[in-house]
Image (spheres, rainbow, N blue to C red):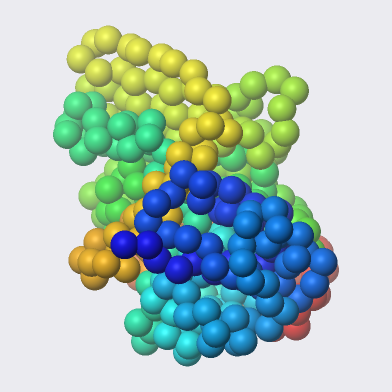
Amino acid sequence: MSHKVAFLGCGGRANAHAWVYDRITRGTPVACCDLVEEKAVAFAEKYGIPHWYLDLDEMIERERPDLVHMSMPPTIRHSLMKRLSDHGVPAVIVEKPIAIGAHDYKRLRELEAASATKFTVNHQLRYHERILELLAHVAAGDIGAVRCLDASARLPLNGQGVHVLDLLFAFADYTPVRAVHAACSGFDDINGTHPSPESLSALITFADEKRGVLQSGAGVPEMAPDVARHMHKRIACYGETGFVHWTMFSWEKGIGGKVERGEHEYRVVDDVGEINLINAVFYWIEDDAAVTPTSLATSLDEWLVLLACYASTVHNTPIEFPFEPEDDLLERYIEFAGAEWTNPHGG
């Protein structure tokens, strides 16, 4: 069965989604949409997509896609996701980060509870073959009971920190969070649409008392010399008897007293991760029980941890869960950081 696929947004990130379709048999791109005609036309020509549009509603009504790849700024996530849901689109893959603050987080919670659309966030690292192998070792008890997780990214929180937080949740086996104690500093408005602390250090305590360490921005471990900032992502999981560790360049595992290490070419393994993510969404379309591990519901659980980091910083205290963030929490953090920011999309 080949599902019909459409693309909303034809900018840089959309390319990472589209170029793997020559290796996917379960879906076929049929249309793309962008407000800029030149971008829509060029994207369609580059990937052999038969139809391009400047109007989202027209594309959905004419093409009736099974899956939409939504590569649009986080400042307008909710409004576009709501429109796709109202059209009855079966599934949507949304770029990260899923939100920018608490106000849109709450709207997305309401949408997730009410919508029949299957939303998945594009945390493709979760679907890398090596990550899946290391997760399998942890799930099998090969490193004993997990005691501590350590995740870091050199880019600010909303740039790449959300990726490694997603991995931290995965290696924690999605155990509920009990408390967050964090220190955020500075402000970085990535691309004008990704408001974020410049740096973050956080301690996350899970309900079973294992601990997670999350760090983004300056001061994180650097994985290789002379590479772009976004390449310094990593996750380590330490158990009673062993460990596993993944970076964008390498992996290692210590199991049964033996340590193994290896390297990989990120671009190659990342393409496979993207393919695996897309196929996981197709499986979910066909089977309601096959919920993806990066579903909207899970991603919002992760986003709540980031909001707890803001709250912990602003209020100078650990944040206990359950936690209900103030609607203006992002604005409070920006004021705390002595910065200014105006949402370019006004919402």
Q: Left or right: where does residue 193 sit relative to residue 253? A: right
Query: Percent from the top left, x then y, of residue 137?
Result: 24, 30
In the image, 33 versus 260, the foreground residue is: 33
Query: Percent from the top left, x then y, of residue 31?
Result: 59, 70
Q: Left or right: where does residue 1 sit relative to residue 218? A: left
When the figure is inspected, residue 329 is found, relative to residue 162, above or below; the finding is: below
**Residue 236 visible in image:** yes
Residue in view at x 42 percent, y 85 percent = 88
State which quadrant residue 9 falls in.
Answer: bottom right
Q: Left or right: where does residue 150 sit relative to residue 346? A: left
Which quadrant holds the N terminus? bottom left
In the image, 22 versus 231, the foreground residue is: 22
When the figure is inspected, residue 61 is found, relative to residue 328, above or below; the finding is: below
Query: Percent from the top left, x then y, of residue 119?
Result: 42, 70
In the image, 167 versus 123, the foreground residue is: 123
Query: Percent from the top left, x then y, of residue 90?
Result: 39, 76
State which quadrant residue 6 falls in.
Answer: bottom right
Q: Residue furthest top?
A: 258
Q: Residue furthest left?
A: 140
In the image, 251 versus 88, the foreground residue is: 88
Q: Left or right: where does residue 131 sit relative to residue 75? A: left
Which quadrant holds the C terminus? bottom right
Residue in view at x 21 percent, y 38 percent = 139
Residue in view at x 47 percent, y 61 percent = 28
**Residue 82 visible in image:** no
Residue in view at x 51 percent, y 47 percent = 22
Total residue callouts: 0
